[in-house]
Amino acid sequence: MKWYITVGFTVLVMASTLLIRIPVPGGGYFNFGDVVIVFCGLYGGKRSGMVAGAIGSAMADIIGFPLFAPITLVAKGSLGFFAGLGKDSSGRMRFIWPIMGGILMVLIYFVGTWFMPSFGKAAALADLPPNLVQALFGFIGGRLLYKAYVKIEGLSGH
């Protein structure tokens, strides 16, 4: 994977996280960043997915929710890494790795929010359902985007 493709993916993750925000209770928001992270991992592998997910998402948080940027760096980097493990996998593992990344992302946000002094257990529990929905949406959307890419690439003869 060329470094400049990973840089482009990082910018796409940041832009897709910032451009369309759907607020959820508790101050967070749904976005399309996870879709792009899962796609990046499946297309570029674990390193590209991890870098794009971690840096692109954390940069978006620095602009909108700076307190969460360190947690996001780890959570979204993990999602991209695990999605990237699906790149060279076959069969069920191509699906299982990104799902595991989504679960880990949700757990990192849960624990991170719980131990933040200004949030705590109640906020972590309140954010759990929206984070699960975000992870599911990211997995489905990222897989569909990757599948569309593979189909288009196959049609072009490359």
Image (spheres, helix red, strand yellow):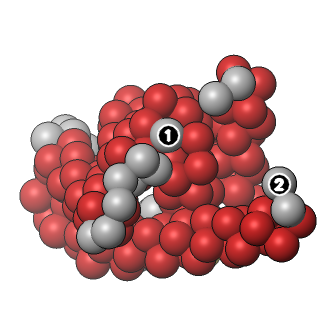
**Crowding near pointer 2: few (<14 within 10 Å), some, many (20+)?**
few
Give the label, 2 or 1, closer to the camera. 2
- Residue 5 horizontal/vertical position (percent): 74, 33
Q: Position of residue 89 (x, y in %)?
A: 35, 53
52 up-or-down from 111: above or below: above
- Residue 158: image tag: 2
Image quarter (top left, top right, bottom left or bottom right) of the C terminus: bottom right
**Residue 127, above or below 4:** below
Q: Nearer the viewer, residue 137 or 3?
A: 3
Q: Is residue 72 visible?
A: no
Dot 1 corresponds to which residue? 45
Q: Where does residue 90 sit, x and y in percent of width and height? A: 35, 60
Q: Residue at x 70, y 57 (%)?
A: 16
Residue drawn at x 58%, y 41% as measured from the top left:
44
Out of 56 and 122, give the one closest to the viewer. Answer: 56
Vertical order, 66 against 35 (above or below): above
> Which image quarter is the N terminus in?
top right
The mark nearer the N terminus, 2 or 1, is 1
